Image (tube, grey):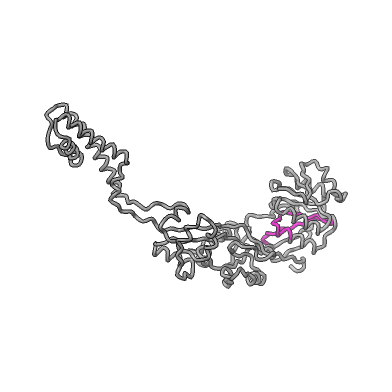
Amino acid sequence: MVNINTILKFLMLQTVTSLQEFIEQNLHRKTLVVISSDFHNIDENVTFIFRLILPKLIINSKNITNLEIFNDYIIVEPDAITLSSSLDLIKYNINSRGRFLIIVEKPLSVDQLKSTFQELWRLYIYNVIIYTNGSYVTWYPYLSKNRCGTATNIVSVLSSNPYDNKIPKKFNGCPITVTWDKLALAIKTPFDKSDPGYSIRLLDTVAQMINISTIYLTKNLPYMKAGKKDFRPLKQDIRQRNIDLVFMVAMAPISPEFEHSIPYYETYCYFVLPPRRKIISSTTTLFIFSTEIWMLIFASAFTMGVLLNYLDDCSLVVSLFQIIELMLQGTVRKVAKNTFVRLVFTVFFFYVLHLAWIYSSQLSGVMTKPSYEPKISTIKELGMSEKKLQFSDVWLGVFANKSAYTNILKKQVKPEKVPSFEKEVLDFTQKLDHAIVISMDRLLFIKNYNKLHLVQKDKV
């Protein structure tokens, strides 16, 4: 989920039940995962966890394995520093949407609580309660009345369901600020809803589904065109204007305080070819029948000629001429006197008529259905074809030292100073005499998760 400018609310839950009763009442779904960096020196007041009549998995945070299938977690650590180290060790092996109870044996100050919740926020652990100094501390990050993350309240409130409404499905119109830069077909302009680009359309669709208000900034840096991947101006702009979200092409993280999402759109190298040309050839009519069938037709004609020569007492040349004339024109110059010869001739005549009907029906299909040049489906076929490829020298590093692209490199036609991707595609569609190479790379979001502000109650 994209980082939202979130309002947090700390609640100091009055300790009306013991810690053991709290666990039994709220963390009783299936297996309970208990995590700590040092079980040998655990506080005596917490050792009751081992005696709970609940399915338990006891595991050291230094030897963590994949625990994403579980939903209930208890993390026990002596202080804030050790807790931070443990969270860093287990962050990729837990279900961040599960329910967490963090027990810190040494009392945490308000600043330490803020720092801990900042860390939990970065790890997307929202459904969490911290037990320290005999009190339960929790938050409601997406509560609408908290003004969507502009402040964090610290108050004492009793709740019968401390894990309720931590991760809502709707965000009641919480605003997020988005900076953007034009990127070919992906990002055109968010202010033209008819054709904003598919990245803008994606974000708008998601925002509508979860009721988030996207605020697209009108003044944006041209960071997509930044030379040598220098994004320092963008980092400064994100900090100064408290920007929540940035569209980005995949690359190394621009700064430790920013985080990128997994790619939401991913393409690699595509060769776009013009439509296949029509092939007009008179030899096409010869291939209606296969070679074997043509051989059978010639053999039957020759056999019939020899038979007619024998039965009708005429020369072989004359009999073959009569058979060929019958097959091509359907005419008979001389009717045989012998009844048996007439019968044989009649059978062959119907054979020729049937053959002519098959040929005519197939020929009509060939004449009405145009033939095209062979379809290119592989890199090897493209390399062996006569197609020319228009691509700039930036692709040479991609194709170099790869045997599959040896013939591709020989087909390069450099573009005539094409200033943009759109004009390159337009040039291709107008000429249709060459192929082009396109790639949208991997598109993702950069999120600013440091927008979490925590203040005292009297400052809200």
User: Which residue is more in the foreground, 68 or 399?
Assistant: 399
Q: Where is residue 78 in the image (x, y as percent from the top left)?
A: 84, 55
Question: For this view, does 283 lie left or right of residue 9?
Answer: left
Residue drawn at (18%, 41%) of the image: 329
Quick one: quadrant of the N terminus?
bottom right
Question: For this view, does 222 lie left or right of residue 68?
Answer: left
Image: magenta residue range: 119-145
Q: How many labels does the image show?
A: 0
Instruction: Work out whether residue 11 can be spotted.
Output: yes
Instruction: Work out whether residue 14 can be spotted.
Output: no
Residue 147, relative to residue 370: is it above or below? Answer: below
Question: For this view, does 234 lie left or right of residue 407?
Answer: right
Residue 321, relative to residue 12: is it above or below? Answer: above
Q: Where is residue 459 in the image (x, y as percent from the top left)?
A: 75, 69
User: Which residue is more in the foreground, 88 or 356?
Assistant: 356
User: Which residue is more in the foreground, 403 or 235?
Assistant: 403
Q: Quadrant of residue 131?
A: bottom right
Q: In which quarter of the image is residue 355?
A: top left
Residue drawn at (47%, 52%) of the image: 378
User: Which residue is more in the foreground, 163 or 49?
Assistant: 49
Q: Does the magenta stretch include residue 236?
A: no
Q: Position of residue 223 (x, y in %)?
A: 59, 69
Q: In which quarter of the image is residue 328?
A: top left
Quick one: quadrant of the C terminus?
bottom right
Question: For this view, does 439 lie left or right of residue 369?
Answer: right
Q: Position of residue 46 (x, y in %)?
A: 84, 49
